[in-house]
Image (cartoon, rainbow, N blue to C red):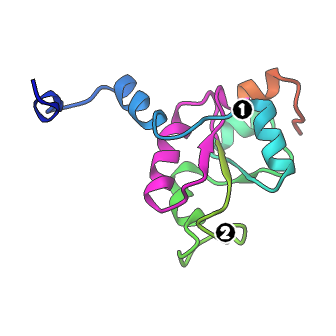
Amino acid sequence: MSDSSKTRQGPVGIDELLEQVRAAYERVGPEEAATAAAEGALLVDIRYAELRERDGLIPGALVVERNELEWRLDPQGSHRAPQATSHDLRVVVICNEGYASSLAVASLHQLGLHRATDLTGGFQAWRAAGLPVSL
């Protein structure tokens, strides 16, 4: 069977999609994310307001609702955040548990933000690792 005949046609389940997306980049753990931030990476918290209010914030992280992410991080966009200065910017996307962030990273890669990654386990892993959280 040729490689082209192995290509899957039709719908892909979310678990398979996540596997495909995550194969395109290296994810980081909480300590790696903290180190990256200390070295100038931009931590981006995409959790919705209720979760941020309930669990707190990562000090220094840029809060961007998921539905605004691409507009705020596109360095060429008219609605970009001041921190979105370059396609070479190191970005670590953080959701609650590390699922939505993977899909967000795939979208950022399509915009040319080739150094974007996400936090394995999300905010919950950050907090469990004892890293700083402000309430």
- The x and y percentages for residue 63 are 70, 52
Left or right, 87 with reference to 33: left
- What range is drawn magenta here? 94-123
Q: Residues within 10 Å of mark 1 (few under 14, many from 20)?
A: many
The structure residue drawn at horizontal position 71% and vertical position 72%, both measured from the top left corner, is 82
Q: Quadrant of residue 15?
A: top left
- The x and y percentages for residue 26 are 58, 37
**32, 95: nearer the viewer:** 32
Q: Which residue is mark 2?
A: 81
Tell me the element at label 1: helix
Say which mark, if any, is on residue 18: none
> Type of residue at label 2?
Ala
Q: Is residue 135 visible?
A: no
- The x and y percentages for residue 46 are 62, 45
The structure residue drawn at horizontal position 60% and vertical position 44%, both measured from the top left corner, is 117
Q: Quadrant of residue 7?
A: top left
Q: Work out whether 104 lies above or below 87.
A: above
Q: Work out whether 74 lies above or below 5.
A: below
Q: Residues within 10 Å of mark 2 (few under 14, many from 20)?
A: some
- The x and y percentages for residue 50 are 67, 37
Q: Is residue 11 visible?
A: yes
Q: Which residue is mark 1?
A: 123
The structure residue drawn at horizontal position 48% and vertical position 34%, both measured from the top left corner, is 22
Mark count: 2
Q: Work out whether 67 lies above or below 2.
A: below
**73, 48: nearer the viewer:** 73
Q: Quadrant of residue 21?
A: top left
**63, 39: nearer the viewer:** 39
CA distance separating discs 2 and 1: 21 Å
> Type of residue at label 1?
Phe
